[in-house]
Image (cartoon, rainbow, N blue to C red):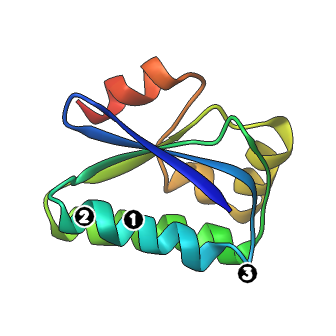
Amino acid sequence: MEIQVTREGDVAVLSPLGRIDSATSPEVEQVVDQQLALGSTRLLFDLAHVDYVSSAGLRVFLVAGKKAQRAAGRIALCNLSPTVREILVIAGFDRVLATAASRGEGLAKLI
């Protein structure tokens, strides 16, 4: 899986490409851990190029949120496709995780 990491001020923006499932979720979690180790406690997942998230992917978001909170930070998800949004809603994660329609809106939730 390819995951582009960029910075928008104090926010690390993680932009994965493809599916986040049991095969790729360890890579996403590794990038999260790397960013937290570098001191980035506010993480924005830009999911514009993610077409599917499995339960393993949902777990990565929850774990990332908990790790960020322990470091006095937080996470948000933005640019969700209709399919990914539906998965979050069905799992009830839309009530637990901050989501945004655009990158700018996601950044605003983290600043």
Q: Residue at x 56, y 73 (%)?
A: 27
Locate residue 108: give its quadrant.
Answer: top left
Q: Residue at x 60, y 24 (%)?
A: 101
Secondary structure category for the residue under label 3 = loop
Q: Which residue is mark 1?
A: 32
Q: Callout 3 environment at 10 Å: few (<14), some (14 to 19), or many (20+)?
A: some
Residue 82 as seen in the image, left or right of residue 57:
right
User: Could you tell me if the residues under marks 1 and 2 are in contact, i.e. CB atoms within 8 Å?
Assistant: yes
- Which amino acid type is shown beneath numbered disc 1? Val
Q: CA distance from mark 3 to mark 2?
A: 22 Å
For residue 36, the mark is: 2
- Which amino acid type is shown beneath numbered disc 3? Ser
Q: Residue at x 31, y 68 (%)?
A: 34
- Give the image location of residue 87, x and y in percent: 79, 56
Q: Residue at x 18, y 70 (%)?
A: 70
Q: Callout 1 environment at 10 Å: few (<14), some (14 to 19), or many (20+)?
A: many
For residue 1, the mark is: none
**Above or below — where is 105 with respect to 106?**
above
Secondary structure category for the residue under label 2 = helix
Q: Earlier in the sequence, mark 3 or mark 1?
A: 3
**Above or below — where is 69 with respect to 6?**
below
- Give the image location of residue 44, x and y in percent: 42, 42
Camera-side residue of 63 and 92:
63
Residue 83 as seen in the image, left or right of residue 5:
right
Q: Which residue is mark 3?
A: 22
Locate residue 12: give its quadrant.
Answer: top left
Q: Callout 2 environment at 10 Å: few (<14), some (14 to 19), or many (20+)?
A: some
